[in-house]
């Protein structure tokens, strides 16, 4: 902190020195003629250029200086010579720091090292950075600082900026795709008297002028369907939804959704729409349908967890083993644990240099040899001490989660979006995982089996929710390649039509990619009587939760239609290889300091 304060004082002193020379950085103007990338890309020796950007590198060579100027498009090197710009201007140039904004004019040339550069003729200081840049441009690694001060993250980590720019391009291509197909983009209310279209906890707000409570919307659906009633046959909206629920790597309380509705369509129509939309966007933005996810962060976390467990178990066991095991095997264990630690630390240093899958495989071998079933079986107890045996068994069990986490990363994660995408019925997937007789046994037996399988079952869960928990815990995370899961239980989706040949399910799909739902789609319910019954059941007798205006709208007649929702944040995670939703949102929700 003292060093930072000292640097800030130095920069403020430079600002005052500039002002004393009649240079006022924050009052200056400059209009660049082209971007840095354009200047580099259209090289003609001696061509005059004018570019502007932030200084990201500074090399003082006495009577000359090199700086790197970077704008959104990229960087270009600038060469300043004292005998060209004059003593006074060169003196001002020496007051520039990393992070300052500058406009430069000059001519293009190629240095002796072969780099396209600008030979400086004149410059204008456009902003003085009064704080030093993060990490002197070597990257910003503190995750919380990255999210809270995203502007620093964008400055220091060019790959982060690339992700955010590609997110913008993805949204632009989605709009273009839908508009080309005749969809009309609309805007519907964010503040709603009744939050409908999903089962979620809303945020409340107060409208002072109207003197009543409103809710931030939890879904776009019901207002878009009103537009189908009004005769707008193809509509879509890209907007924010708000759900007052948990935070996780897949969930942010404020998130961006696309919803689109097509009159005279159905869930089959919308499956084609989703598949074609995503493949078209991927091809246009990424230039490929094969996406490999970077797993460096995951392997870093797994190895760090392995080190923590190794240290804890080694400390706990060493004294016990020296007393209860023969000296040779106890000493061998201590040595093996030490070697494992060194190997894991060495693996950490290779992250980003070697494939994450390769590092994970090596870490598994190290862990098993030192602590897991292999290593612990080498220990010969000198006595039949049950308590010590229990310590050994407990140590091995602790490393099950370590090995499991590493195994998930031990193969490259590659998603292939090339069609046709797999389609599978919800019930068939459940039977494959939970038993062919799942839907034939009693609800009590289903609950017990789900528990035995490791699904998290709430005590108040209804029967369909127990099945849903099995799907979410044991099936959805395995659906890495694009899969349409169809015909979900009717209780899960009250706004869709029943399946004609199985009235326990609805004509619905969930498009799952990368182990999470990317897009649901329905054959929309347009029978006002059936819709009222199902919404009343969902409301549980609380009439104030019914959107009566929506039901009245349906009674005026809505055409049969297909509808989809696509979580833009999750789509970007999948397409851009990001493992956390916070890494595709510029300013994710955080608790205020």
Image (tube, rainbow, N blue to C red):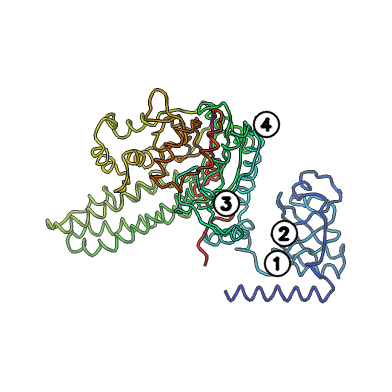
- The question of residue 24 being in magenta is answered with no
Kindly report the distance in space between the C-alpha atoms of the residues bearing marks 4 and 2: 38 Å
In the image, which residues are magenta?
A: 561-566
Q: Earlier in the sequence, mark 2 or mark 3?
A: 2
Task: Kindly identify which residue carries mark 1.
Answer: 129
| Residue 118, above or below 471 | below
Which of these two is toward me, 71 or 332?
71
Rendering quarter of residue 474: top left
Which residue: 77% across, 47% down? 40
Task: Kindly identify which residue carries mark 4.
Answer: 180
- Residue 531: x and y in percent read 46, 35
Which of these two is toward me, 213 or 444?
213
Task: Kindly identify which residue carries mark 3.
Answer: 191
Q: Secondary structure at mark 4?
A: helix
Q: Earlier in the sequence, mark 3 or mark 1?
A: 1
Q: Earlier in the sequence, mark 3 or mark 4?
A: 4
Mark number for residue 54? 2
């Amino acid at each position: 902190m003292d060093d930072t304060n000292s640097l800030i004082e130095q920069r403020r002193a430079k600002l005052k020195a500039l002002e004393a020379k009649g240079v006022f950085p924050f009052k200056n103007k400059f209009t660049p003629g082209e971007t840095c990338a354009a200047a580099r890309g259209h090289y003609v020796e001696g061509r005059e250029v004018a570019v502007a950007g932030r200084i990201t590198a500074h090399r003082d060579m006495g009577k000359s200086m090199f700086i790197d100027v970077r704008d959104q498009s990229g960087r270009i090197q600038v060469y300043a010579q004292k005998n060209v710009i004059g003593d006074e201007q060169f003196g001002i140039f020496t007051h520039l720091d990393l992070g300052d904004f500058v406009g430069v004019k000059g001519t293009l040339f190629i240095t002796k090292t072969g780099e396209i550069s600008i030979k400086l003729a004149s410059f204008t200081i456009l902003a003085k950075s009064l704080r030093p840049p993060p990490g002197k441009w070597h990257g910003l690694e503190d995750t919380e600082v990255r999210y809270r001060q995203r502007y620093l993250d964008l400055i220091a980590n060019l790959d982060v900026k690339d992700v955010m720019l590609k997110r913008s391009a993805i949204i632009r291509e989605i709009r273009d795709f839908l508009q080309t197909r005749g969809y009309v983009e609309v805007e519907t209310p964010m503040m709603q008297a009744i939050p409908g279209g999903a089962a979620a906890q809303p945020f409340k707000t107060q409208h002072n002028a109207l003197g009543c409570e409103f809710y931030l919307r939890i879904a776009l659906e019901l207002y878009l369907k009103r537009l189908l009633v009004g005769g707008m046959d193809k509509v879509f909206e890209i907007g924010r939804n708000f759900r007052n629920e948990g935070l996780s790597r897949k969930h942010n309380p404020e998130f961006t959704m696309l919803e689109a509705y097509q009159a005279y369509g159905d869930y089959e129509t919308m499956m084609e729409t989703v598949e074609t939309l995503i493949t078209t966007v991927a091809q246009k933005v990424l230039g490929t349908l094969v996406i490999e996810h970077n797993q460096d962060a995951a392997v870093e976390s797994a190895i760090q967890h392995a080190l923590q467990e190794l240290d804890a178990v080694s400390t706990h066991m060493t004294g016990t083993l020296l007393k209860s095991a023969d000296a040779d095997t106890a000493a061998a264990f201590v040595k093996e644990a030490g070697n494992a630690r060194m190997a894991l630390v060495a693996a950490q240093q290779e992250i980003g240099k070697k494939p994450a899958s390769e590092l994970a495989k090596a870490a598994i071998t190290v862990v098993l040899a030192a602590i897991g079933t292999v290593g612990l079986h080498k220990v010969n107890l000198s006595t039949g001490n049950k308590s010590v045996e229990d310590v050994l068994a407990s140590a091995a069990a602790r490393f099950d989660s370590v090995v499991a986490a590493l195994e998930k990363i031990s193969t490259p994660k590659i998603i292939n979006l090339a069609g046709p995408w797999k389609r599978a019925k919800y019930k068939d997937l459940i039977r494959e995982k939970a038993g062919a007789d799942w839907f034939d046994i009693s609800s009590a037996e289903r609950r017990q089996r789900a528990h035995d399988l490791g699904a998290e079952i709430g005590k108040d869960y209804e029967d369909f929710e127990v099945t849903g928990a099995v799907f979410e815990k044991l099936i959805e995370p395995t659906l890495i390649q694009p899969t349409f899961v169809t015909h979900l239980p009717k209780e899960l989706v009250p706004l869709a039509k029943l399946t004609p040949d199985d009235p326990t399910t609805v004509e619905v799909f969930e498009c799952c990619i990368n182990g999470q739902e990317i897009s649901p789609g329905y054959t929309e319910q347009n029978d006002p009587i059936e819709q009222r019954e199902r919404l009343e059941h969902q409301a549980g007798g609380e009439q104030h939760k019914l959107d009566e205006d929506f039901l009245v709208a349906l009674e005026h007649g809505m055409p049969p239609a297909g509808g989809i929702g696509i979580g833009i944040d999750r789509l970007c995670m999948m397409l851009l290889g990001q493992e956390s939703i916070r890494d595709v949102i510029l300013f994710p929700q955080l608790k205020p300091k």
